[in-house]
Structure formats: structure tokens, C-alpha cells
Image (cartoon, rainbow, N blue to C red):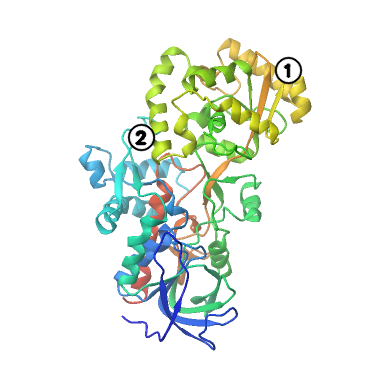
């Protein structure tokens, strides 16, 4: 189906992508100058061209829908361009590896993990579709997919994680090309602002180009795919209690899709939370560091809050960083890791494994090697690249941190309190020493293998912030990705995909690796098909 557009309006694209030429008709001037309004018509307009938006665009365009995608950023893919892997069940890769768990088992596990508060028909549909989608990415777009087995976080976890190569926006080049081949159009640096509503349903989107030009797209259906709200401090404070997060991947996602859906009458789920990274981040980093200082956050050392009080079992962030450990860190906000000179010397000379007893050291070495491998090749944040080795840059990075105000050193705990303001630290360290000496954390039940003494001065405090990928939770949707009202009625023609939608997730994050990208691609594909059906295509 053709667009019938008459005037070519070129738009600059990312250096990593070919220039995309958008055919258009304009209202008033067709010059493309600032202030010149532009009008378009389409069957489906998609706000956001990340993993979910592009997947929706592919499916809708293949169904014959006239598709326009509006992307705020300068390249297609969003943070999905930098996502390491996608979760799936019963993919061809898992079958070839002889993996036996099936869709029923994973669905039952995930539903139970959320205490069944997510929308079960949606979860079931995503799980059922997930294996086919991984194969689709490989066969249709030539993506290099590699199953991680055994899983990065240990053999007890399901092997659902499929790494994606190449890493970066170029991975989406074939996806954009497929949309364009089927008549779809992509506008870069064009921000969706608000929905056009008539008779209780969306009939288009008002957007704005980087130069200020207003863009009006009239369409029969709208798909919102703007990537959550990690860049919106007010929404973070309202949803999580604070905004003290560091973005692991810089994001333009400011909650626009969630806001637009609410304005259209959609309801939101009970919570919005941040998908926490597997590792904490200091507020600053040395130029070209090895990131050894960041590994202190996952070494199961003593963590305290801004009052100097221990607030959770630190071993959880070592063993379950994406779910229970990450949830605890996120709920607290800014935190401090406390340790002594002996710990520094041990880490610098031998690495994380040297903090463990001999038997456990050998047991965890393989996992640390896996973390190092995937940290250097993609799969986990690059800060893990040194996890299996001596932290030979730790002292230099800590000195830099002292110069820049996020590392403190003192001859005694009392003096450490004076420079950090962590008022409760004396009692906390004294109690922690008792637990360590007894090799029994009767307070918070950390495994005794992670009880590292704080006895040999000088003593140190390092400030960390929870690092996040994006937000989870948002607009209520059904299994067709239709936005729902407070009465659970679908809003005709309005679909919400990816992390703008909230019915798939519940805090904490699943212990199924790759769930966010699994949801992004599958929700997008489903919405593209369902929106096309809604239009009779």
C-alpha cells in the first residue's frame, strides 16, 4: 500500500546508520525550516523506535499497514541497541543444547515469582512466543545469537539467556530496512508529544522535530513504545521514593508514553520500579579505569545506608543481583561499602575469590571466570571484566575517588565517621565484627563465606549509587497489548509495548535472565499484529 506522499523531506540520521529519507506532505511550507508544520497520514503510528517499537513496525508493515515510527533519538534501537541478551524458552538454540525445561515450567515459575499479581494471560503469551522470536531475529535479520549455558549467575538458574551480537545500533539496520521495504517510514530526532483523541480513542500523534517543527500524524491506531521513565526524576521519586540512580545506558526515556496513555484514560499498575544493574556504580570514575572499584559493590562486604546502618544481607547482591539483591539496593538508594586495609591488600593481590574460604574459592572460580568473560565480550556490564583476576587498579581508582569526594580513608572508625557523616557506623562495625568472629550472621543471615572482618586500619568507605537500566511497571495492558482503563476496558486503537507497559512485571525483577528484552521484542511483535487486526488488515 502506498503513502501517496508528494514532497521529499530528508532527515539527518546517526553516523551508524544510513540516511533515512522520509517522503511527506506538509501543511503550509514544505521547506523543513523551524516552525513549518508537517502533516502525515498512516494506518499505525508508533512512538518510539527501540526494540519494541521496531518489532511492532516490522510486523505491522508486513501485514500491509502503512506505518510511521517517531523516534526522539538520533538512531533506531534505543537502549535495546546496547542490550546484551534476550530471554527465551524452547528456542532452536536451547533444543540443540539439549535443554529440557519447557514453556509450562518457565511460565509457572515466573507467575509464582510475582505471587501471581501480573496479568497471567499476557505472561503466558510472552513466554509461549519467546523461543520463536529468538529464532526470528536470527533467520530474518541475520543476528548472531549465542545461548549462554551454564547461565552467567550459576547452574541453578534456568538457561534462558541468548546473547545478541553485534553490539550497538547497527544491529537494527536490517530491521529498519525491513520496515522500509514494506513501506514504513522512520522519523529520527522527532519526539512524540501528545495523542490526538476523538470520541475516546486515539487518531494520531502530535510530535516535534529537533528544530522545533511540529509534526502531525493521523492514524487509525497508535502504539506507544517510549522505553519507560528512567530519565524522569519526578516519576522516579513518586514511584520508588528517590531518584538516586545512575543510568547504565544513557536514555532519553522520560515517561512520555506512560503520560500520553494516562491522558488518554489508561490506568497504571500498582508500582513503578527500576531494573537494577548487576553492579553498583560510584558517582564518578577515573579516566579509563578498569572499574575495579565498582566490584567492591558485589564483593559481599559491609553495606550501610546514609545513617551508617547495615540494611540488608549483602550476599544477595553477589548471588542475586538482578532480583532480590538489586531490589534491596534500589529501595535503599545511596549506600556505602565499608572495609579495611587488609581487604584492600587481599583484593589487589588476588581478586574477589581471595576473600572466600579455600573450598568456596574453588567452587566460585568458574562463575567468576564466566563473569569476566562476559564482562569483556558483552553479556554483563563491562565492570565485571576483572572479576576473576587481581584488582590491580583498585588502589589507584580509590585514590582518584578520594580526590573527587566519593572515597574516604581514616585511621579509625570514629575518624571515618567524622569525614563521612555516617553517624551509626561505630555500633554497626562493632556488631559486624562480632558476627564475623562467630562466623554466624544471626542478624541478617548472610552466608558465613561472605563475612569479611573489618579489623586492620586504615579503614575505608566508598559511596555507591544503584545503577539502573530502565524502569519497569507502567500502563495496564492485556494479552493483546491494548491499554486498559481503570475498569479494565481496552481503549480502542491504543497499544502500549515494552517497558511503558506494566502488566508483565512486579518487583523484584525476575530471576529469568533476559526478561526485559524478551518482553520488548515479543510485546512489540504481538502489538504490531493486533493493531493490524484492529484495522482489518
**Percent position of residue 149, x then y:** 31, 35
Q: Can residue 526 be spotted in the picture?
A: no
Query: Which residue in the rendered view is the most extreme toward the bottom?
Result: 28
Give the secondary structure at mark 1: loop
Q: Give the answer, above or below, for where 301 lies relative to 508.
A: above
Quarter of image, res 442 = top right
Check disc 2: other Cα within 10 Å, few if <14, some if 14-19, many if 20+: some
Mark 2 sits on what residue? 151
Q: Earlier in the sequence, mark 1 or mark 2?
A: 2
Residue 313 falls in which quadrant of the image? top right
Q: Position of residue 256 (x, y in %)?
A: 56, 63
Which disc number belongs to residue 163?
none
Going 57% across and 17% down the picture, which residue do you hit? Answer: 345
> Which quadrant of the figure contains the N terminus?
bottom left
- Could you say whether the residue bearing mark 2 is in a helix, strand or loop? loop
Q: CA distance from mark 1 to mark 2?
A: 42 Å
x%, y% of residue 215?
A: 53, 77
> Image check: 301 left or right of 478?
right
| Residue hosting label 1 | 411
Amino acid at each position: 500500500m502506498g503513502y501517496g506522499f508528494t514532497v521529499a523531506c530528508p532527515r539527518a540520521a546517526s553516523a551508524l546508520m544510513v540516511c533515512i529519507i522520509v517522503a511527506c506532505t506538509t501543511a503550509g511550507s514544505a521547506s523543513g525550516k523551524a516552525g513549518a508544520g508537517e502533516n502525515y497520514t498512516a494506518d499505525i503510528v508508533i512512538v518510539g523506535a527501540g526494540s519494541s517499537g521496531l518489532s511492532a513496525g516490522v510486523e505491522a508493515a508486513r501485514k500491509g499497514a502503512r506505518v510511521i515510527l517517531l523516534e526522539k533519538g538520533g538512531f533506531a534501537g534505543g537502549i535495546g541497541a546496547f542490550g546484551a541478551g534476550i530471554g527465551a524458552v524452547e528456542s532452536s538454540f536451547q533444543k540443540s543444547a539439549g535443554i529440557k525445561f519447557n514453556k509450562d515450567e518457565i511460565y509457572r515459575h515466573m507467575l509464582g515469582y510475582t505471587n501471581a499479581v501480573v496479568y497471567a494471560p499476557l505472561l503466558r503469551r510472552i513466554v509461549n512466543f519467546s523461543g520463536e522470536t529468538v529464532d526470528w531475529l536470527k533467520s530474518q535479520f541475520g543476528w548472531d545469537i549465542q545461548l549462554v549455558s551454564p547461565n552467567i549467575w550459576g547452574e541453578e538458574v534456568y538457561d534462558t539467556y541468548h546473547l545478541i551480537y553485534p553490539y550497538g545500533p547497527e544491529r537494527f539496520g536490517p530491521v529498519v530496512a525491513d520496515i522500509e521495504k514494506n513501506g514504513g517510514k522512520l522519523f529520527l530526532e522527532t519526539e512524540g508529544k501528545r495523542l490526538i483523541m476523538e470520541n475516546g480513542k486515539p487518531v494520531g500523534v502530535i510530535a516535534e522535530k529537533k528544530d522545533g517543527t511540529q509534526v502531525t500524524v493521523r492514524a487509525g491506531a497508535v502504539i506507544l513504545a517510549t522505553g519507560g521513565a528512567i530519565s524522569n526524576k519526578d516519576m522516579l521519586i513518586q514511584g520508588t521514593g528517590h531518584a538516586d540512580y545512575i543510568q547504565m545506558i544513557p536514555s532519553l526515556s522520560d515517561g512520555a508514553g506512560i503520560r500520553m496513555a494516562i491522558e488518554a484514560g489508561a490506568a497504571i499498575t500498582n508500582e513503578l520500579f527500576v531494573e537494577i544493574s548487576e553492579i553498583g556504580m560510584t558517582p564518578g570514575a577515573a579516566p579509563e579505569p578498569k572499574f575495579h572499584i565498582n566490584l567492591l559493590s558485589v564483593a559481599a562486604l559491609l553495606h550501610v545506608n546514609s545513617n551508617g546502618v547495615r540494611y540488608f544481607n549483602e550476599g544477595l547482591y553477589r548471588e542475586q543481583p538482578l532480583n532480590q539483591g538489586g531490589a534491596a539496593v534500589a529501595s535503599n538508594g545511596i549506600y556505602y561499602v565499608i572495609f579495611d586495609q587488609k581487604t584492600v591488600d587481599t583484593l589487589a593481590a588476588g581478586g574477589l575469590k581471595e576473600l572466600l574460604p579455600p573450598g568456596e574459592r574453588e567452587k566460585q572460580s568458574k562463575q567468576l571466570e564466566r563473569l569476566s568473560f562476559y564482562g569483556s565480550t558483552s553479556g554483563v556490564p563491562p565492570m565485571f571484566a576483572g572479576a576473576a583476576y587481581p584488582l590491580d587498579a583498585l588502589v589507584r581508582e580509590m585514590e582518584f575517588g578520594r580526590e573527587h569526594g566519593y572515597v574516604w580513608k581514616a585511621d579509625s572508625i570514629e575518624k571515618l565517621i567524622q569525614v563521612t557523616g555516617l553517624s551509626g557506623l561505630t555500633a554497626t562495625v562493632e556488631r559486624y565484627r562480632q558476627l564475623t568472629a562467630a562466623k554466624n550472621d544471626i542478624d541478617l543471615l548472610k552466608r558465613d563465606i561472605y563475612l569479611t572482618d573489618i579489623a586492620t586500619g586504615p579503614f575505608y568507605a566508598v559511596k555507591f549509587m544503584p545503577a539502573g537500566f530502565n524502569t519497569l511497571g507502567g500502563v495496564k495492558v492485556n494479552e493483546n497489548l491494548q491499554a486498559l482503563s481503570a475498569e479494565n476496558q481496552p481503549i480502542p486503537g491504543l497499544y502500549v509495548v515494552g517497558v511503558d507497559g506494566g502488566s508483565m512485571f512486579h518487583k523484584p525483577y525476575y530471576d529469568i535472565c533476559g526478561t526485559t528484552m524478551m518482553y520488548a521484542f515479543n510485546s512489540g511483535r504481538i502489538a504490531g499484529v493486533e493493531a493490524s487486526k484492529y484495522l482489518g488488515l
